[in-house]
Amino acid sequence: MDTAVLEQLLDETFDHAVVHHGYTKYMRDYEVIVYATADPRTGVAPAHLRYLFRYCVEARCETAVAAETWRVSLDDRLLDHESGADLDGYVWGVKWHSLYPGAKLLPESDATRHWSEALGIDFHEVRLQTDAHNLTLLFSDLHVTEAQTGYAPFVVE
């Protein structure tokens, strides 16, 4: 995948909302579902976009929430927006995370070189930062499509 195209696709995620992320049902590719919005004056309708990181050989997810905040965010009432709204702590139940400062392509690394040589295709490393989780993905290709109405990546058939 051309790195300029990849960087442009990643730039378009800036300040939108991640509503789901994880490996696909078939467990090879990693998907990030982004709710993209624009200023209503632009006339651009909001959309759920599926960022499919193909041939994902590594996915790391780590917290972006500070330990002090975690300490006061263990109450299960914070899992629901309504019951957690008036409590101190991080309200997990908002069901989305802001993609800020966003996603960026990382420089070539030993890992990307290793997988490129082993499989004979280019590999890339991307860091997606949100207010709750930071993701690092090692993959070969990225496809972005609009998620269909009712798309539920977490439903097992």
Image (cartoon, rainbow, N blue to C red):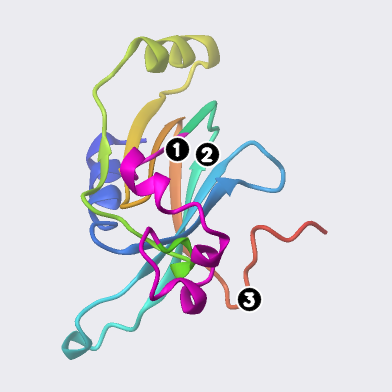
Q: Is residue 57 left or right of residue 111?
A: right
Quadrant position of residue 7: top left
SS of the residue at dot 3? loop
Q: Is residue 86 magenta?
A: yes
Residue 18, compared with residue 29, is above or below; it is below
Q: Position of residue 13 (x, y in %)?
A: 29, 57
Residue 153, compared with residue 40, is above or below; it is above
Mark 1 or mark 2: which comes first in sequence? 2
Callout 1 amino acid: Asp
Inter-mark Cα distance, 1 to 2:
5 Å
Crowd tier of the residue under label 1, counting other residues whose Cα lies within 10 Å: few below 14, some 14–19, many 20 or above: some
Residue 111, compared with residue 17, is above or below; it is above
Boundaries of the magenta span: 61-90
Report the residue marked by disc 2: 54
Report the residue marked by disc 1: 141
Mark 1 or mark 3: which comes first in sequence? 1
Inter-mark Cα distance, 3 to 2:
22 Å
Crowd tier of the residue under label 2, counting other residues whose Cα lies within 10 Å: few below 14, some 14–19, many 20 or above: some
